[in-house]
Image (cartoon, grey):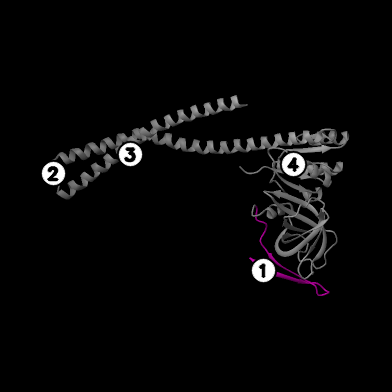
Amino acid sequence: MKQPSVLIISDDPEFSRTVVNRWQTERLVPEFTIVSSAVCNGARVSEYQVAILGGMPTETSLTTLARLAASNRPAVVVAKDAALVKRIRDEHPRALVLREYLGWLEALVLVAGEALRRAEVMDRARKAEEKATSNERLATLGRYMLDMRHSVNNALTSVLGNAELLLLEPGGFSPEVRDQIDTIHTMALRIHEIVQRFSSLDTEMSFAERESQSDTAKRARASSSAD
Amino acid sequence: MSQEIVVRSDDGDAIRGVGASASVSPGESVVARLAHFFPEATPVRISVSVTGGEIGGLGLHEKTVIEFATPNEVLFASALPLEFADQLRVRNADNSLDAEVFVVAVQYHAGRTAVAAQFVKKVPNWIVKA
């Protein structure tokens, strides 16, 4: 799996150092990109899962948050004073704000870690949805083929029946024409075999679907008992 | 397509490097990924030595290659334990580039570090112009 990425935006070197060092003790250590607010405000960046802002003046924090809003990624802001907390909550309701009080670092890693896990789950859900859409298209095609099976069989019955009637007429056709009618008969039989395979495929697909549902239920039960 | 760039200033100093007109292609290297933060970044290749900071009283030094540049910043990969806001000195072999810089962005990825450092003072013969 691709390593998750955390973007730290700060003008205070101590802030980024503290956050990165604290995260080293976690089981999941993401890839860090640390930039100053000036660099971030001139860039169009979306290659991160969570942004952390801290160690910046009030106006800079608000400007940076406004720029990040376009990326639609979660942003966690560490604010020193209550006035900034209020302004962020008023102007950027989607941003997560932490007051810089005792234990803020633990809270930050916890919140940002959960945001990373949520981003990963959302990514998986999006991929699963894309896969399901693709499978749905294939299933529609398969259902159409199975529905058409009867129409093809009806047409084949007519072709086979007429070919057999013609072959039953002794001396009615030259050997070359009889060979051609025989070929029509053989090919019609081959098409019939192929259409028959669609029927067995239908049975196999139903079986595989039942097995898959059973496996999914077993995994879900195992996962919930492990939690 | 890469080509050698030689820029000579009024006093005769020249900075040699290899530049390319191509835009930043995403995901190629850790430095290229950091370059996404710098819309003006241009791919270049300039061999330099980087000095700055110290560990246990020993000065840090390494040779590296500037992979991207803007009119005010240089971007390179580094094996040094560099951090945001560190002060460094960047020099090339013939000293036509000898500038103080400070780190404005770092990216740590799979044991590698990409660094973007901004010139403290304007470099008159710098090859990337605004």
Looking at the rendered structure, the kind of residue marked 4 is Ala
Q: Chain of mark 1?
A: B
Looking at the rendered structure, the kind of residue marked 2 is Gly
Label 4 crowd bin: few (<14), some (14–19), many (20+), radius 10 Å = many
Looking at the rendered structure, the kind of residue marked 3 is Ile
Residue where numbered disc 3 is placed = A194
Badge nearest the viewer, 1 or 3: 1
Residue A82 in sight in this render: yes
Residue B41, image x, y percentages: 73, 58
Label 2 crowd bin: few (<14), some (14–19), many (20+), radius 10 Å = few
Residues flagged by tags 2 and 1 on a common chain = no
Find residue A51 and name its label: 4
CA separation, marks 4 and 3? 57 Å
Residue where numbered disc 2 is placed = A172
Which is nearer the eye, A128 or B130?
A: A128
Residue where numbered disc 1 is placed = B3
Find residue A61 and name its label: none
